[in-house]
Amino acid sequence: AIRMTQSPSSFSASTGDRVTITCRASQGISSYLAWYQQKPGKAPKLLIYAASTLQSGVPSRFSGSESGTDFTLTISCLQSEDFATYYCQQYYSYPLTFGGGTKVEIK
Amino acid sequence: EVHLVESGGGLVQPGGSLRLSCSASGFTFSSYAMHWVRQAPGKGLEYVSTISSNGGSTYYADSVKGRFTISRDNSKNTLYLQTSSLRAEDTAVYYCVKDEHYSSNWSPLGGWGQGTLVTVSS
């Protein structure tokens, strides 16, 4: 199975900050990488797929990039509604695998 | 609008079985691969199983292989997960999830249900 290593596991930030979350795949996954946002008690929501394609309706402050097997989710200007847990996931091969998650908390 | 409603969760003893169901509406169910993803209390997301749009292909996480069986009834727009030999570590919220893209070999996970809680405890 492809291992997805996500970092950091958590951090604190302030509204307006630019934040970056990284995800590394244990082998090549082409660009078959998605990012999800999950708020407490809610189901995850797809934010970005194909490493950098913004899902319809997702604010443009979210962006994704890739470099080899390293992937990055960036929030350019953190808003109050962005405090949540974020997961990366590869859909290149089965079993599908998720990163461990990154919890973004209010500083 | 995509609507996925899971049911069938509950409290079960170790070694027991449960059949989870997911009723789908708002999209052409028979055109999409479907998945089960679970989340243990306070933990991250864990992939469980996938079934292709016509039911001809299935995939499982190693942790559930041989104990869980995924199936679907396209005439009823319903997805199932038959679980057996349940263990304490299977305790989780189980989400029913649809592919974002239809008839695609590579698709992110699109619509998610609200989940059904399975608790394995004596």
Image (cartoon, rainbow, N blue to C red):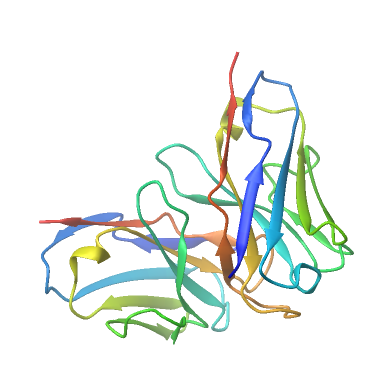
User: Looking at the figure, which quarter contains the N terminus of chain B?
Assistant: bottom right
Q: Position of residue B68 (x, y in %)?
A: 77, 41
Q: Position of residue B12 (x, y in %)?
A: 66, 22
Which residue: 32% across, 81% down? Answer: A59
Q: Is residue B76 left or right of residue A81?
A: right
Is any atom of residue A1 visible in this view?
no
Front-most of residues B77 and B43: B77
Can residue A18 be seen in this snapshot? yes
Classify residue A65 as left or right of residue B79: left
Q: Compared to A103, does A36 lie above or below?
A: below
Front one among A51 and B114: B114
State the quadrant of the C terminus of chain B: top right
Q: Is residue B120 above or below residue B25?
A: above
Residue drawn where x is 61% and y is 71% of the image = A91
Residue B109 in the image: x percent, y percent?
58, 68
Q: Residue furthest top?
A: B122
Q: Quadrant of residue B96?
A: bottom right
Q: Position of residue B28 (x, y in %)?
A: 75, 73
